[in-house]
Amino acid sequence: MEVKVLGKEIKVTEAINNYVEKKLERIDKYFENAKAEVTIRTEKNEQIAEVSVIANGEKYRAEAEERDLYASLDRVADILEGQIRKTKTKKEKMIREGSLKDFHKESDAENEIKDEILKYGYYEIKPLTPEDAMLKLQERPTHNFMPFINIDTNKVCVIYKLKDTKNYGIVEPEA
C-alpha cells in the first residue's frame, strides 16, 4: 500500500510514520494495490487523524479525534476496516442473490399486477408561454415532462423531452 502522511501543525516523525503504516496493513489485506493519504493535525487539546483510502475505484474516508494521536490513529483504522468489510459483504451478497433473482422472476411474472394505477404524481401548474415552459424543464434535468397553462391559449398543456434529448414536444387538448 502506498501511504502518504501529512502533518498540519505537527511534525511527522519516523515513529508516527511507522505506526501509520503498521495500522494501515490491516486495510492492505483487503486490496492488492491501494493508496492512502493520512493527515494528522492538532486542534485545541485534540489530536485528529484523517485517512482517505482509494482502492479498486472506491474511496473510503474516516476521521477520528482523541487526546492521544496514536489512539486517534487506532480508531480511524477501525472505522476504515469496518467500512471496507461492510462494502465487501454487500457486494458478495449482491453476487449471491443475483442468481436467486432469476429464479424469483418467473414466479413474480405470474403475480404481476396489470391494468392498475400504481403511482400518482402531483405537479404545480403555472401559466407560462411554451418557451418559458421549455426553459423551466431544462432547469430540471431529471424530469422528462412538465404540465403548464399556456398563456396564449389558456389551455393545460404538457411539454416533454423528445427521445433525441435535444428537442421538445407539446401536448395540447383539441377542444
Image (cartoon, rainbow, N blue to C red):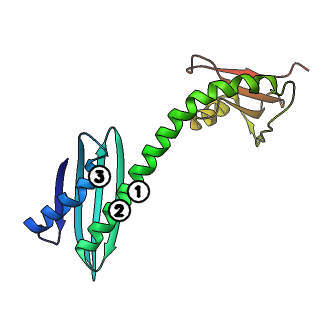
Q: Which residue is tagged 1?
A: 82
Quadrant hosting residue 52: bottom left
Give the distance between the C-alpha atoms of the residues marked 3 and 2, in whole angstroms.
Answer: 9 Å
Q: Please, what is the three-letter code of the amino acid marked with disc 1?
A: Gly
Left or right: where 23 falls relative to 12: right
Q: Secondary structure at mark 1?
A: helix
Q: Residues within 10 Å of mark 2 (few under 14, many from 20)?
A: some
Which residue: 34% across, 38% down?
A: 57
Residue at horizontal 91 percent and vertical 21 percent from the top:
175
Check disc 3: other Cα within 10 Å, few if <14, some if 14-19, many if 20+. many
In the image shown, does 159 or 11 lie closer to the viewer? Answer: 11
Which of the labelled discs sits on residue 78, or is there none? 2
Tell which residue pokes out farthest to the right in this image.
175
Amino acid type, callout 2: Asp
Front-most of residues 162 and 7: 7
Are dots 3 and 2 in contact, CB under 8 Å? no
Indicate the amino acid at tag 3.
Ile
CB of mark 1 within 8 Å of CB of mark 2?
yes
Circle 2 — which element?
A: helix
What residue appears at the point 47 percent right and 39 percent down from the top-left corner?
Answer: 91
Q: Position of residue 142 (x, y in %)?
A: 59, 35
Residue at 30% in and 45% down: 54
Please tell me how crowded label 1 is: few (under 14), some (14-19), or many (20+) other residues with Cα within 10 Å. Answer: few
Name above or below for residue 58 compared with residue 113.
below
Which numbered disc, 3 or 2, marks the residue that appears first in the sequence?
Answer: 3
Residue picked out by circle 3: 27
Task: Single out the residue that lies furthest toward the top.
Answer: 164
